[in-house]
Image (cartoon, coloured by chain):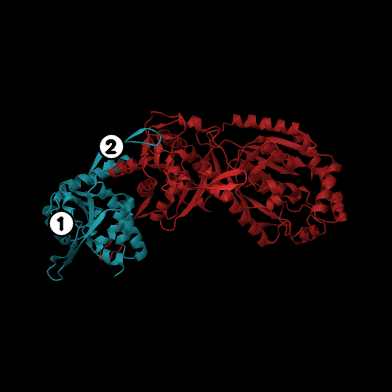
Chain colours: A red, B cyan
């Protein structure tokens, strides 16, 4: 009954978010499958290594929340791959990402926090607490564990006997770490290796991580190299008493990982403790803040969070409001390509703009208009001359498209309506998807989901969104493509209707991006809808308008009274 | 509207056309994209599946452009945001007529644009020796005389078939100026003979070229 009633609930505006959740669930399932197949899942085979795999770094390599973690098992089930953090006061969805660039579309630098501390000092707990308290959606957690060097056979053998020193700086690939961190700081996409603690080598697959507003980098030797220290905007050292750290290690390795006391102690005394004294403790001098007692120290965490908030606001991460009023009354830019305004196009607009158009007609006429827009967009691609033989025996001087690699990327949800048309005009075209939603409280666009063809940098990209108002979502999508190394000139933004300000914003930020649309409207209202506009295109196309605008159901639902002792319940029957 | 050069190039071509064929022969704006479609259709090495795919695309473009020739009236509607929009409204009373067989290839394109439009058919056969066209079959909506007619025929090399079909339409009291001919490829000879026969009729084509891709019907329907 509950399910039935739920089903009958009028679709709310949050319905698109449930899309995201569905995706999330699917991804997690597939990731789990992979782990089972590869047979090194943490629970199944307790690895003999001194720093065994963290659940976080192995779990969900393809999950949407892309971050590496080295959480201990007790926490990781909740926080490692699921994009929801629950603290005692509130629930934080760490999925959507607000703009990470300024109004000119240029990258604003993310804030990098380095967390260093001895083994089992509670670095991850501190990191998690910071993420919770920051309440900023897009945070990347990068763990040094991902950067262990690949072991040769001899070292592998040593590791099995607890005789390989995993706490020594030589155990880490600092070059790769430096490169990865550097790229992340530039907001670029990186492939983080997944280290397998059974084979002591990197797996074939990598975890894709994509820049963030805040990057937290944690590891026992986080402060060891000068060039990495330079990248860190804030350095936190977690200073937990050695006895407590040993106690935690014993607890973790014996109770949870099934290792024997002798082995753990041997490793601790020969490697872990000396390494702490030689390499880790001395780096404490670099720290901006030393946090005693790790994650329990709420005062220290509040201080850190306060500082990060101040820094972020200085870097300018609030975009949409500014965009809406930036350029008014300027001539339209040269990169804008508008379809010739024929009676047909005007007539199609008349149908889809009319608030009284039924959804059936709305969809039909939208599709026709979309097809025309896509055909027009394709004509803007580069072509080259081509001579062909004809069955008539006379050669024909024609043209062929110069680039065979064209892909579509739709901005969910409204952009998806244009996918069919792209598939109808380009055989076997690849389609990527980007989910960007407007945060209702801030009015800012947020990035939730991203799936792009693998080698997208080699493609001409047709970026699709049904309507462009402020251009904030389109800008975010373009920024994502640029961060995936797609050249700016290879991007076409294609949409049915744009507001003048959106056109200006995109053209100003990305002058080489070609803008294609069938109409440009002059204004945007306070809800960021285009005027006169189409209304909410996605809602009208998919039929998810808020309840009061819903069309009457053809057959009124029957009401069946059911008598229960002392209660009177009305049930709506759906069939 | 594309770049300034594109428009001026297009206008130039338009003027040449006006001089040679008069105002009633119209072509699709010649973009590289359209040129590519024509190239693929003409290429003898194109596979049948590609041929049909790209032919359908070109047909859709020609049909959309033909619909632009239909009459419309101005209207004002309210958008969901509560603003007004000055739009256009199509008038009712149109129909399609396809010339069997290759004209039928264009029916789907028309259906994709106008879901419930009435479509009539004419079968014209040309005598193998004399090339004289002969009407074998014709079936139209009853009130065709009151309608605008979108006559569909993709390839015209002599224009005889079309001339014969239009004659049949006019025998059914369709007004010459109410006929719009949708065509993909047309030879200058056919264009001129049709225009001189029916100066009031509108012709829309994608290309006027001395060589007509006569294999169109066979390749499209797979009977080659």
Between B138 and A169, the one nearer to me in the picture: B138
Q: Is residue A259 above or below residue A289?
A: below
Q: In the figure, residue B118 lies in which quadrant?
A: bottom left
Q: Is residue A351 above or below residue B122?
A: above
Badge 2 density bin: few <14, some 14–19, many ≥20, Cα 10 Å? few
Query: How far from the left and from the top, in percent, is residue B147?
Result: 19, 50
Residue with the mark numbered 1? B169
Real-space Cα distance between discs 2 and 1?
32 Å
x then y, percent, for residue A287: 75, 35
- Viewer-proximal residue among A225 and B104: B104
Q: Position of residue A222 (x, y in %)?
A: 73, 42
Q: Secondary structure at mark 2?
A: strand
The subunit carrying tag 1 is: B
Pinpoint the chain carrying mark 2. Answer: B
- Going 73% across and 39% down the picture, which residue do you hit? A126
Q: Secondary structure at mark 1?
A: helix
Q: Determine if residue A340 is in view.
A: no
Residue at mark 2: B75
Labels 2 and 1 share a subunit? yes
Q: Are marks 2 and 1 in contact (CB under 8 Å)?
A: no
């Amino acid at each position: 009954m509950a399910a039935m009633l739920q089903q009958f609930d009028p679709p709310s505006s949050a319905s698109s978010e449930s899309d995201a959740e569905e995706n999330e669930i699917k991804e997690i399932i597939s990731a789990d499958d992979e782990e089972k197949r590869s047979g090194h899942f943490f629970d199944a085979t307790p690895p003999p290594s001194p720093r065994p795999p963290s659940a976080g770094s192995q779990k969900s390599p393809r999950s949407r929340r892309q971050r590496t973690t080295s959480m201990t098992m007790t926490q990781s089930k909740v926080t490692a791959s699921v994009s929801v953090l629950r603290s005692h006061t509130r629930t934080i969805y760490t999925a959507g990402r607000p703009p990470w660039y300024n109004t000119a579309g240029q990258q604003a630098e993310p804030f990098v926090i380095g967390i260093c501390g001895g083994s089992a000092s509670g670095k991850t707990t501190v990191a998690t607490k910071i993420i919770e308290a920051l309440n900023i959606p897009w945070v990347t957690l990068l763990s040094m564990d991902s950067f262990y060097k690949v072991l040769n056979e001899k070292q592998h053998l040593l590791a099995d006997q607890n005789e390989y020193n995993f706490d020594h700086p030589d155990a880490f690939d600092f070059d790769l770490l430096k490169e990865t961190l550097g790229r992340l700081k530039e907001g670029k996409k990186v492939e983080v290796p997944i280290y397998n603690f059974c084979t002591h080598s990197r797996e074939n697959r990598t975890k894709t991580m994509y820049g963030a507003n805040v990057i937290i980098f944690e590891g026992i030797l986080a402060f060891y190299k000068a060039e990495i220290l330079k990248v860190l905007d804030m350095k936190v050292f977690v200073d937990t008493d050695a006895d407590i750290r040993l106690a935690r290690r014993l607890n973790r390795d014996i109770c949870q990982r099934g290792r024997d006391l002798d082995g753990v102690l041997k490793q601790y005394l020969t490697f872990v403790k000396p390494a702490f004294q030689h390499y880790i403790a001395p780096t404490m001098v670099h720290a901006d803040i030393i946090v005693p007692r790790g994650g329990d120290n709420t005062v220290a965490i509040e201080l850190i969070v306060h500082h990060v908030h101040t820094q972020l606001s200085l870097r300018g991460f609030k975009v949409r409001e500014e965009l809406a009023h930036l350029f008014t009354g300027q001539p339209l830019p040269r990169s804008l390509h508008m379809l010739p305004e024929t009676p047909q196009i005007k007539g199609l607009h008349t149908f889809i703009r009319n608030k009284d158009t039924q959804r059936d007609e709305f969809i039909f006429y939208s599709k026709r208009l979309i097809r025309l827009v896509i055909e027009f967009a394709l004509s803007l691609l580069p072509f080259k001359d081509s001579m062909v033989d004809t069955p008539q025996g006379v050669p024909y001087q024609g043209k062929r498209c110069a680039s065979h690699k064209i892909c579509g990327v739709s901005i969910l949800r409204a952009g998806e309506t244009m996918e069919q048309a792209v598939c109808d005009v380009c055989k076997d075209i690849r389609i990527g998807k980007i989910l960007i939603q407007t945060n209702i409280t801030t009015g800012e666009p947020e990035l939730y989901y991203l799936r792009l063809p693998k080698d997208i940098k080699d493609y001409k990209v047709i970026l699709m969104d049904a309507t462009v108002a402020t251009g904030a979502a389109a800008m975010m999508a373009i920024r994502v493509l640029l961060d995936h190394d797609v050249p700016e000139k290879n991007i076409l933004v294609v949409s049915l209707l744009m507001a003048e300000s959106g056109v200006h914003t995109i053209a100003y930020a990305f002058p080489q991006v070609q803008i294609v649309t069938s109409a440009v409207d002059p204004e945007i209202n306070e809800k960021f809808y285009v005027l006169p506009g189409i209304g909410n295109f996605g809602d009208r196309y998919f039929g998810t308008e808020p309840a009061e605008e819903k069309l009457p159901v053809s057959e009124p639902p029957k009401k069946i009274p059911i008598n229960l002792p002392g209660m009177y319940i009305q049930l709506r029957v759906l069939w | 509207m594309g770049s300034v050069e594109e428009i001026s190039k297009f206008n130039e071509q338009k003027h040449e056309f006006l001089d040679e064929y008069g105002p009633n022969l119209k072509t699709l704006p010649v973009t590289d994209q359209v040129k590519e479609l024509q190239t693929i259709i003409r290429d003898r090495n194109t596979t049948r599946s590609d041929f049909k795919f790209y032919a359908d695309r070109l047909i859709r473009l020609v049909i959309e452009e033909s619909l632009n020739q239909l009459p419309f009236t101005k209207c004002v509607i309210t958008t969901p945001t509560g603003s007004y929009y000055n739009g256009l409204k199509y008038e009712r009373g149109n129909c399609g007529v396809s010339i069997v067989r290759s004209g039928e290839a264009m029916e789907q394109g028309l259906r994709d644009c106008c879901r419930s439009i009435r479509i009539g058919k004419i079968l014209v056969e040309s005598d193998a020796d004399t090339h004289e066209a002969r009407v074998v079959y014709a079936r139209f909506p009853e009130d065709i005389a009151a309608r605008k007619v979108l006559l569909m025929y993709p390839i015209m090399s002599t224009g005889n078939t079309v001339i014969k079909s239009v004659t049949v339409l006019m025998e059914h009291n369709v007004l010459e100026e109410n006929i719009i001919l949708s065509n993909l490829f047309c030879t200058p000879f056919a264009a001129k003979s049709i225009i001189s026969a029916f100066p009031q009729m509108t012709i829309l084509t994608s290309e006027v070229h001395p060589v007509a891709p006569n294999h169109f019907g066979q390749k499209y329907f797979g009977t080659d």
